[in-house]
Image (cartoon, rainbow, N blue to C red):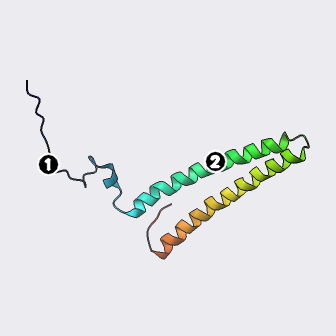
Amino acid sequence: MNIVRSVYAEVDFGNKDLNPVAKFDSITSLVNLIVPIMMIIGGIITLTMLLLGAYKYLTSEGNPEKISKAQSVLIYAIIGLFLIVASFVLTKIIGFVLKVDMPL
């Protein structure tokens, strides 16, 4: 019974099949993957918060405390949406200034 296995002393970290990080040959390709995913997640969260704020506002029954809570949820959701758009614009501006091709 032979328990000894083959050992490879040299590993090619540039091989895309063995190392998934090797697929990102530059920071641009990594940013092009991460930024759209983050924007989609942020958009989904913003939509959820807008719907939640609207539901709270509609079910407040005229209670001033509930109305102020609903308004604060709506305001923070709109601020979040503004931050998402601003991050996209800032990413595009940085790509333009550094002359990096970022097909976002």
Residue closest to the eye, 88 or 49: 49
Toward the viewer: 3 or 55? Answer: 3
Name above or below for residue 17 compared with residue 3. below
Residue at position x 70%, y 47% from top?
49
Image position, residue 43 (x, y; %): 62, 51
Q: Position of residue 31 (x, y in %)?
A: 45, 60
Question: Disc 1 designates what residue?
Answer: 9
Q: Which amino acid does label 2 sit on?
A: Ile
Left-right relation of 56 to 83: right
How far apart are labels 2 and 1 at the CA level? 47 Å
Where residue 91 sits: x, y (%)?
53, 66
Name the outermost residue toward the top: 1
Q: In which quarter of the image is the N terminus?
A: top left
Residue drawn 70% across the image and 59% down it: 79
Query: Looking at the picture, how far across and down is residue 60, in whole percent?
Result: 86, 41
Query: Which numbered disc flags the more N-terminal residue, 2 or 1?
Result: 1
Binning the other alpha carbons within 10 Å of mark 2 as few (below 14), some (14 to 19) or many (20 upward) gives some
What secondary structure is marked by label 1? loop
Nearer-the-camera pick, 31 or 10: 10
| Tally of numbered discs | 2
Q: Is residue 18 above or below residue 2?
A: below
Residue farthest along the bottom direction in this orientation:
97
What is the three-letter code of the residue carrying label 1? Ala
Tell us which disc is closer to us: 2 or 1.
Answer: 1
In the rendered structure, the answer to whether residue 76 lies left or right of residue 36 reads: right
Question: Is 102 placed above or below 11 here?
Answer: below
Residue corresponding to mark 2: 45
Q: What element carries label 2?
A: helix
Q: Is residue 90 left or right of residue 103?
A: right
